Image (cartoon, rainbow, N blue to C red):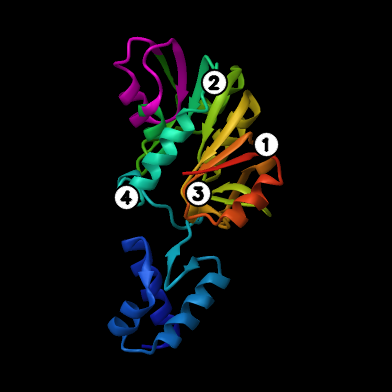
Amino acid sequence: MVAEERRRAILETARRAGSVDVGKLAADLGVSKETVRRDLNVLEEHGLVRRTHGGAHPVESAGFETTLAFRTTMHVPEKSRIAAAAAELLGDAETVFIDEGYTPQLIAAALPRDRPLTVVTSSLAAAGDLASAESITVLLLGGRVRGGTLATVDHWAVHMLSGLVIDLAYVGANGISREYGLTTPDPAVSEVKAQVVRSSRRRVFSGVHTKFGAASFCRFADVTEFEAIVTDTGLAASEAHRYSLLGPEVVRV
C-alpha cells in the first residue's frame, strides 16, 4: 500500500470510528508506529485530522460532517455534564435559542420546566423534546431540513430569526479556535448561526474538548462575542485560560 492509499484508509477509519489509535493502525496496516505517526502528521497538516495522545480524530470539513445519530454515541458523559452546566447559565432569560446538534439537544432537556420560557430552535429533535412541556412555548424555525442533523436551514430560517430579539442563545459549532473563532462545514448552517449571534443579547458556546483548536469551512462568530464557553476537563486549564483572555468565562466540567 502506497502512502496516499494508506493515508486515505486511515482517514476513512477515523471518520467511521470517530478516532484512531496509532498502535492499532500500525498492526492493521502492517507498518511501523512511526510511519503511522508521519501519516497522521500529514493528514493534520491538511486539516483532515487532529492529533491526540496516541492517535487522532477526524476534523469536520466542507466534505465531511458527522450525523446527529453518530454524535449521540461519542463523549456522551462529557456532553451530559456540559449540558447541565450550560442550562445553569439561563439566568433570568425568558426567550432562548437552542442550536442544532446533540449537546444543544441535551441542554434543551435540562431547561427548567417550572417557569415560562419561549424556546426558538432549528432542531427538530429539541423541538420534539420540549413540545410536551406546558410552561414552554416552542418556535421551530422553518426551512430546508438537513437529513444528517434534523435541523432547518436556508433563507426561511434566517429571515425568521432576523425579526426576533433573543435573551440567550445556546450555540454549537464544529470547531472553535482563538485564531478563526467558531466555524461549521456548511454555508447554510453558518448563515443561520451568524443570524442567531446577531439576534441574541447573550450567547453561550457549549462543546466537548475535541472541538477546540479545530477550524472548519465557514466562520460565523468570534470567541469575543460569547459571554461563556462550557466544555469538559479534557480541555487543558492553560488552554481554557487563553480563551478566557478573549472575554468569555470558561467553565470546565
Label 1: which residue?
Answer: 225
> What is the spatial separation of the Cα atoms under label 4 and label 3, in whole angstroms?
14 Å
Q: Residue at x 34, y 80 (%)?
A: 23
Q: What residue is pinned by disc 3?
A: 174
The front one of 61 and 58 is 58
Label 4: element kind: helix
Residue 134 image point, x, y percent: 33, 10
Q: Which residue is mark 2?
A: 91
Q: Which residue is mark 4?
A: 70
Instruction: Looking at the image, tell me whether mark 1 or mark 4 is earlier in sequence order.
Output: 4
For marks 3 and 2, give the CA distance: 26 Å
Give the residue type that dot 4 points to: Phe
Would residue 178 be found to the left or right of residue 188 on screen?
right
Q: Is residue 57 above or below residue 211?
A: below
Mark 1: secondary structure: helix
Compared with 182, 24 (above or below) is below
Q: What are the residue bounds of the magenta stretch? A: 110-136
Magenta region includes residue 112: yes
